[in-house]
Image (cartoon, rainbow, N blue to C red):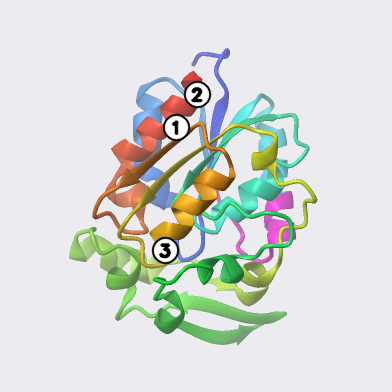
Amino acid sequence: MNDQRPAVVLVHGAFADASSWNGVVERLLERGLEVVAAANPLRSLTTDAAYIRDVIAGVGRPVLLVGHSYGGMVITEAAAQNDNVVGLVYVDAFAPDHGENAFQLSVKFPGSTLGDALKAYPVAGGNEFAIRQDVFQQQFCADVPDAQAAVMAATQRPVTEAALTEGLPAETPAWKSLPSWFVFSDGDRNIPVELHRYLAERAGAKGHKEIAGASHALSVSQPAAVTETILEALGS
């Protein structure tokens, strides 16, 4: 592996797990890059970001942080005032400012149908959300084969209400001090494409790419496009 290049730390979002990055990981490993697909706890923004900061510290070298969906909230917090992070890649992801939370951002523009697709149930310390399996493919990964979507629905990682409603603690979000890149789908039913465009422009992204017809599960259905954006960030 080339020790001159940053490692890549991938952070999944809600209703997914680290395996959602498999296609991206395979492509990055083929290029000799060091890659870690972290297991995002999905418990609270503060504790999730603290965990990812520990993962970054354990890598022991500079990292490029890549976040999907709610994972964008986590990388924005984990990278704040973190000298080990060299850049941020948002994949169909939230890029919040101080105090903004995932629920608040998801309804800033019309188009999200996630609320109607969720089921909620109590767990220790609060409530937890999952996407109903009968609508999971339509909502989350419409461009993924039926059999694969069924497995994704059965293995989805639920997220707590606390995680989705906690505002970004950092006074200065990481995208204000670090270069950022955005790749997103115009068929995203969780996060409206207008929000993706708005967040990329607000962050002053060094690069952004919109994938026509793709679902929210961009790292699963379009791993080559996601990898291309990551490589662009690494090469800048």
Picture coordinates of residue 76, whole percent (x, y): 65, 47
Q: Quadrant of residue 29?
A: top left
Picture coordinates of residue 88, whole percent (x, y): 57, 37
Of the numbered discs in the image, which one, if any, rests on residue 122?
none
Q: Is residue 131 magenta?
A: no
Looking at the image, which residue is at 53% across and 68% down?
Answer: 108
Q: Which class describes the residues within 10 Å of circle 3: few (<14), some (14-19), or many (20+)?
A: many
Residue 171 versus residue 28: which sits nearer the camera? 171
Kindly report which numbered mark, 1 or 3, lies closer to the viewer in this rendering.
3
- Please, what is the three-letter code of the amino acid marked with disc 3? Pro
Q: Which residues are magenta?
A: 38-50
Alpha carbon of mark 1 to alpha carbon of mark 3: how far? 22 Å
Q: Which residue is mark 3?
A: 192
In the rendered structure, the answer to whether residue 208 lies left or right of residue 205 reads: left
Q: Which class describes the residues within 10 Å of circle 2: few (<14), some (14-19), or many (20+)?
A: some
Among the two numbered marks 1 and 3 on one chain, the one whose residue lies closer to the N terminus: 3
Residue 157 versus residue 93: which sits nearer the camera? 93
Residue 39 versus residue 10: which sits nearer the camera? 10
Among the two numbered marks 3 and 2 on one chain, the one whose residue lies closer to the N terminus: 3
- Please, what is the three-letter code of the amino acid marked with disc 1? Ile
Secondary element type, mark 3: loop
Q: Which residue is mark 1?
A: 230
Of the numbered discs in the image, which one, if any, rests on residue 234?
2
Do labels 2 and 1 touch, CB within 8 Å? yes
